Image: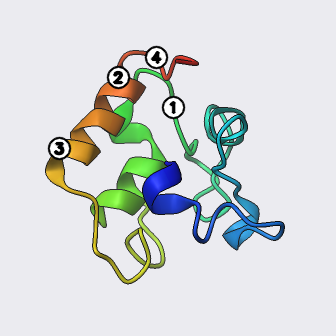
Amino acid sequence: FSARCTGCHGSVSPSSGLSLISGSARSNLVNVTSTECSSTKLVAPSNANGSYLVHKIEGTGPCFIGSRMPLGGPFLSSTDIGKIRSWIAQGALDN
């Protein structure tokens, strides 16, 4: 997440209160309820389609609210989205 997300989600006052800096990104995402969609976890381990993070980076989903991320683009490549989906599908491990 560092390369594309921490410009907004890495400062002292991260956007939407979500810090994605190295060392805290996983704990701030995995099994954390989305503030924009309270029925969805930001990252639901083993369930990429049910993870709000995926909805935000793809700009779609049953509970998609607001803007696609990264805000204003350029958006993540299909390869990068695939890596995030794969990480989630494999259980969102701390690796």
Q: Which residue is mark 3?
A: 79
Question: How many angstroms separate mark 2 from mark 4 (CA)?
Answer: 5 Å
- CB of mark 2 within 8 Å of CB of mark 1? no
Q: In the rendered structure, which amino acid carries the disc numbered 2?
A: Ala
Looking at the rendered structure, the secondary structure element under dot 1 is loop
Give percent across and percent down for residue 71: 44, 78
Which residue does the image show at 41% across and 28% down from the upper left? Answer: 88
Which residue type carries mark 1? Ala
Say which quarter of the image contains residue 55: bottom left
- Up/down of 59 relative to 29, above or below: below
- Of mark 2 and mark 3, the one earlier in the sequence is 3
Residue 53 lies, in percent from the top left, at 46, 50
Q: Position of residue 43 (x, y in %)?
A: 52, 37
Extreme-bottom residue of the structure: 72
Let me know if residue 17 appears in the view. Answer: yes
Q: Point out the frontmost of discs 3 and 1.
A: 3
Q: Residue at x 72, y 38 (%)?
A: 24
Residue 44 image label: 1
- Do residues under tags 2 and 4 come within 8 Å of each other at their CB atoms? yes
Q: Which mark is residue 89?
A: 2
Q: CA distance from mark 1 to mark 4?
A: 8 Å
Q: Which residue is mark 4?
A: 91
Alpha carbon of mark 3 to alpha carbon of mark 4: how far? 19 Å
Which residue is drawn at the image coordinates 22% and 38% (left, top)?
Answer: 82
Residue in the picture at 74% in, 66% down: 11
Q: Give how far across and how far down residue 47 sits, in percent.
A: 39, 28
